[in-house]
Amino acid sequence: MERFNLSRRGFCAGGVAAFSVRPTWAAAPDDLTARKARVQLAPDGYPMTEVWSYDGMLPGRTIRVGQGERVTRRLVNDLDVPTSIHWHGIRIDNAMDGVAGLTQDAVPPGHTFDYDFVAPDAGTYWYHAHTNSMEQVARGLSGPLIVEEAQAPEVDADKVLMLDDWLIDPDSGQFFDDFDQPMALSHAGRMGNLIGTNGQYQLELPAQSGARLRLRLINAANARIFVLRLRGLSGWSVALDGMPLAAPEPVMDEIILAPAQRIDLIVDVTAPEGETAALLRLDDDDQWRAQVAFPVQGARSGPRRERPAPLPPNPNTALPDLTGARSLDMVMEGGAMGRLGMARYQGRDMGFRDLVGQGQFWSLAGQVGMSDEPFAELERGEVVRLRIENRTVFAHAMHLHGMHFRKVAADGTLGPLRDTILSIPEEPLEIAVSADNPGKWLFHCHMLGHARSGMTTWIDVT
Ligand code: C2O
Ligand code: CU
């Protein structure tokens, strides 16, 4: 404090020499301030929207660090409500996971919390509020977190594309604030009426014909499953949920990106000069529309490049050995048109009607929402198989904190590492988790309305 005053005096005195005694702030983390801001989310001509933002920006500014480096941020809560930050997909120290009520207390208005962790894996991640996240994320509290490889693939441009949707009243420009609307909670979730990228309604990124782009797609929407296609771009998918694929896979058809999922693409612009390449999305009316447009300006000289090499693998990502692995079962029930019999909510067995009265619609393994008891207690290093049976009529984007997992195919082969996976009604789903990160970790649906109304549980790794 004293040193600060000293520098203030020096500053006011205006002497150049005074700057030499200014303390450095190397030890203090950068602030990440959660606060209200007004931004132009809706197309030009419509009113601006009051959002909840990090540092006044939507999405929050992209945090970029090198693999193995520390991320330090002081969350400053300038909102009127408590909040916290979750670093989605990072194999993080449990105390830094940001889950209010499980790994930390929510940060009250006017208070701060210092996040300090190492990012062990290169890849595309994101950060978002994890206190009343249904509402806080919908209002804008999220941003990209990029961990760079020591040896990044050679591309002409590296673009983060954060796909999102917002539910906004076109007359006022403000969010509809019915975040507890039972219709959305009990059905597919809260869908926006305005879809955009990086906080813009129609994002345009000029590109050269023949250029090679790395596109880091992040689905930050509360419930929307993006169905995407390339036009005038051709290339490979090289990473899912941050984790490199063993071999780049050519993008042949549609890309399905569930809430919270990421995909890294390396694409070449094949459209000629003067045309517009695009990342297209299948819209609610079954039309393909540009999610991101790439007007082609100029051409890159030189021959067409070869297929990219795989991204360097992350540490500790060997295939787990399933021999003797314990199997756990999780039945998902509830929702509109579903059956939810008795389920346990806050320590009591309740019927569907009572649950609805509590604003709860879903259960995981007979449990509605959090309980003091974890869904499973795992020993550190243990490999478990989790069989998920989706008895609802909706898809659910199931996310595990703190560790990635792999899908186990019917023939026992293991899929790529993921931190969020789409469970489809009636389709059996099995995942294998190597419980190598100790702590209390959430497992929940990333359709955040579902998470709020029952689909949140946790595991304990000790
Ligand atoms: Cu992306 Cu529990 O969160
Ligand atoms: Cu769900």
Image (tube, rainbow, N blue to C red):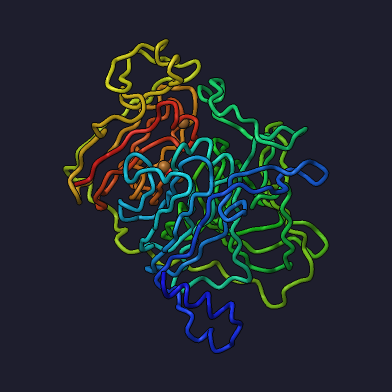
Number of marks in the rendered image? 0
Check the image and report above or below for 161 versus 176.
below
Taking 243 as reference, is 165 left or right?
right
The foreground one among 33 and 14 is 14
The foreground one among 182 and 203 is 182
Rendering coords of residue 337 (x, y %): 49, 15
Rendering coords of residue 233 (x, y %): 67, 58
**Residue at the spot 33% in from the left edge and 33% down from the top edge:** 457
Check the image and report above or below for 332 versus 417.
above
Rendering coords of residue 347 (x, y %): 27, 21
Taking 455 as reference, is 209 left or right?
right
Taking 14 as reference, is 239 left or right?
left
The foreground one among 383 and 451 is 451
**Residue at the spot 77% in from the left edge and 59% down from the top edge:** 295
Check the image and report above or below for 412 versus 209.
above
Quarter of the image that includes the N terminus: bottom left
In the rendered image, the residue lying farthest to the bottom is 17
Rendering coords of residue 19 (x, y %): 53, 84
**Residue at the spot 43% in from the left edge and 41% down from the top edge:** 421
The foreground one among 117 and 259 is 117
